[in-house]
Structure formats: C-alpha cells, structure tokens
Image: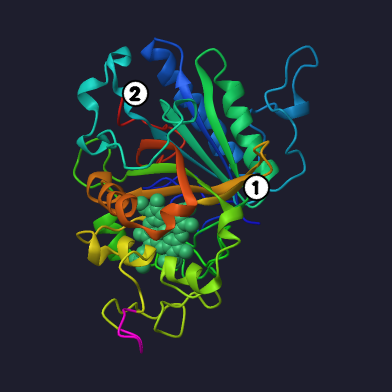
Amino acid sequence: SDPVPFYGEHQAGIVTPAQDRLHFVAFDVITDKRAELVELLQEWTAAAARLTQGKDAGTFGAIGGSPEAAPDDTGEALGLPASGLTLTIGFGPSLFDDRFGLASRRPAALADLPKFPGEQLVPEISGGDICVQACAHDPQVAVHAIRNLARIGFGKVSVKWSQLGFGRTSSTSRAQSTPRNLMGFKDGTNNMKLEDAQLLRDHLWASGNDWMAGGTYMVTRKIRMTIETWDRTSLSEQEAIFGRDKGAGAPLGRKAEFDTPDFNATGPDGQPYIKADAHVRLAHPSHNGNAHLLRRGYNYVDGSDGLGRLDAGLFFIAYQRDPRTAFVPVQTNLAKHDALNEYIKHVSSGLFACPPGVRDAGDYWGRTLF
Ligand code: HEM
C-alpha cells in the first residue's frame, strides 16, 4: 500500500482514513535536561519520517551498519511495505510541569479531565508525558515503529504503558465502510470525517497563532466491556441501548445507516424509538452544546482475566479542538445516563496536546513548543 505523507500542515494519523491496526504508547520523560528532550524529538522525527515511508528507522538500517555495533533498526519490518503507517505525537499535561520550563506554555485546553462517575482508572495505564499513536494496516509495522522509537529514546524516556488494537472501530472518511466494535454494532457512522471541511475547521484543529495552531487534542480511554453479560442480552435490548439497529446501523425508527436520527419520533407504543438513555441520543451534538469529536478508536483483546472472561473492549481515541467543550460534556452526559454503562468500565485515561504537522526535513515534532 502507498505510504502516507509524513510532512504537512497537520499531523497524519488524525483525519487519515483509519487504518486497521494500532500500537499506542505513552512515555515518561526520564531525563531532566530540556536540551536532551529537544534532541530526542529531533531524532524521533527523523526516524518517523523514514519509518512512515517504509524505510528502516536509521540510515544504516537493520543489516547495513557495522557488524560490531547494534543495528539502528531492529529488523522485524525488513521486506514489509509502509502499510499506511502513521505516527502521531502528543504531549501530556505532566510534560508542562517545572522540569523543562514549559509551565507557562501549557494550553488552557489541556486542562486535566474531571473525575467522571463510575470510572475505575488504573494509574499505571493512564496519563504519560508523551504519547505516540502508530496506526498501520499491518500490526508488525505498527509495533516495529513504536519499538524503534522506544529504542532511540533509551535513557531519555521510558515506556509507561502501551496498547495494541486489532480492528478499527471508526471510519474517518466517507470512502470507508463502517466497521463494527466488539458489541457487534457499526461504529463510526456519525463520526466527523475527512470530507467535513467546515466541521474540521470549527471542531478539530486548534486555531489562533500560539504553538498549538494547526494541532489538536487527543483523549484516550481504555473501556473494558463485560462482553459475557452483553452476549446474554436480547437483540432488542442491545439495539435500544445504542438507539440503532444491529444490521444496517440505522437509527431506530429509520431505515438506512446514514439516515438522520429523529429523537422526537415515537413508535406505535407512544414511546420514542430512541430512548432517553440511548447512547446515540446522549452522545449526539444536539444534546451536548454542539460538541463534535473525531473518534478513531480500536478493538482490543488483552488475553483473558484469569476468571474465565476475555479482557476485551474498546480503546477509545478522540480528537477535538478543545476537550473542555467536546469530550468532557459528552462523557459527563454518558457517565450519568448511558444505558451502555451496565456493560462497560473505563479503566485508563489519557489527554495529550498534539502539535501541528512537521513541515519539512528541517522541522521537528514540537518545534513550535520549544
Ligand atoms: C456513537 C459505541 C463510548 C461518543 C456510537 C455508536 C456506537 C457507539 C455503536 C453509533 C454509531 C456511530 O455513530 O458511530 C460505543 C461503545 C463505547 C462508546 C461500544 C464504549 C465501549 C463512547 C464514548 C464517547 C462516545 C466514551 C465520548 C465520550 C460517541 C459519539 C457518537 C457515538 C459522539 C455519535 C453520536 C451521534 O452523533 O449520533 N458509539 N461508544 N462513545 N459515540 Fe460511542
């Protein structure tokens, strides 16, 4: 498959049509030297520019360097194409503490998320100073990219947590078909998409002329599903929970996937087709002050939990211009009222400021911040 261009006004991996595989990593910075951090970002950028074009991480490559030295690429992607690889970086709130003199540069939109009712966040798999989202059509290519960035960062950053995702749960372009999540429903139908130029300008990209202009904010939530309980729930109950039918993905009361939901329409019993606690009603922009998200999440199964259950769910990723007026109101609404809550548990959370795109080979990830 064709490589995705690395350079541009915005980072790739956001409106890029969602690839099938994810390897997401959050790093903590362990050096306390600002110059070392900047140097690492420059090295990472050079490696990312190469990796996303299907090349080895370093200029010698896995087998081209001195036999006496450790190779500057680990080798497991030798012979594999670029596979649509994108690498997208974000900076967490903790990077803006006193260590690097960045406190005054912390954007207001990077405000810590509030505590949401019902969440059971595990600190060890939440947060992080820097994240990198690797997406590709081939899992080996995504893992190879993250592994090599971690290798390059040795001594300056350490991996705090990472997450593999095996199937996209959103479409970010009208050219893509809508995939299904692990509850079996089409996911991403009413997502913000590449073609929605006006929506992207108004709700995705940060504007103004500070260092974040052309960037965006990422929220991640690892959401475990109790799929064994879900799997014993009747089809009509499942459809009522989302407010869409399971086959076509149509809003209840309508026929086709992309029909507009009518939240006022009532069925023969006089009750609304889309119930008050249905996920799509509660998440819809019309019920959240016109909040829009670009969702770009992945299905995950992390083996089993030792208690006879699969450890499975949704690794939710959403991009937006300002989480305070997008993710936060939507999740507040969902956490309080969503019928889906009986079947899910939020176990990890991340918030990151994703800087604008890298313009050319002389530019680097985060240059406008430093
Ligand atoms: C819509 C599933 C969590 C925000 C949907 C749809 C499904 C779905 C099946 C309908 C199809 C579509 O338009 O994409 C899930 C599952 C979740 C989950 C299984 C958890 C495991 C979340 C969270 C948020 C969210 C945490 C944000 C805080 C939305 C939004 C829509 C949506 C904004 C579109 C609503 C509309 O405009 O019609 N979700 N979702 N979802 N979801 Fe979720």
Crowding at dot 2, Cα within 10 Å, few <14 / some 14-19 / many 20+, comes out as some
Identify the residue shown where x is 42% and y is 78%. Answer: 258
Locate residue 111: give its quadrant.
Answer: top left
Q: Which mark is residue 94?
A: 2
The residue furthest right is 67
C-alpha gap between disc 1 and disc 2? 32 Å
Label 1, ligand 1: CB separation under 8 Å: no
Identify the residue shown where x is 66% and y is 35%. Answer: 144
- Earlier-in-chain disc, 1 versus 2: 1
**Per the image, is 268 magenta?**
yes
Residue 189 image point, x, y percent: 45, 68
* Magenta-drawn stretch, dominant element (helix, strand or loop): loop
Whether residue 229 is visible, yes or no, is: yes
Residue 324 image point, x, y percent: 23, 44
The residue furthest bottom is 268
Give the secondary structure at mark 1.
loop
Residue type at mark 1? Ala
Of the pair 329 and 177, the residue shown nearer to us: 329
Q: Quadrant of the N terminus?
A: bottom right
Crowding at dot 1, Cα within 10 Å, few <14 / some 14-19 / many 20+, comes out as many
Q: Which mark is residue 82?
A: 1
Magenta stretch in the rendered image:
266-272
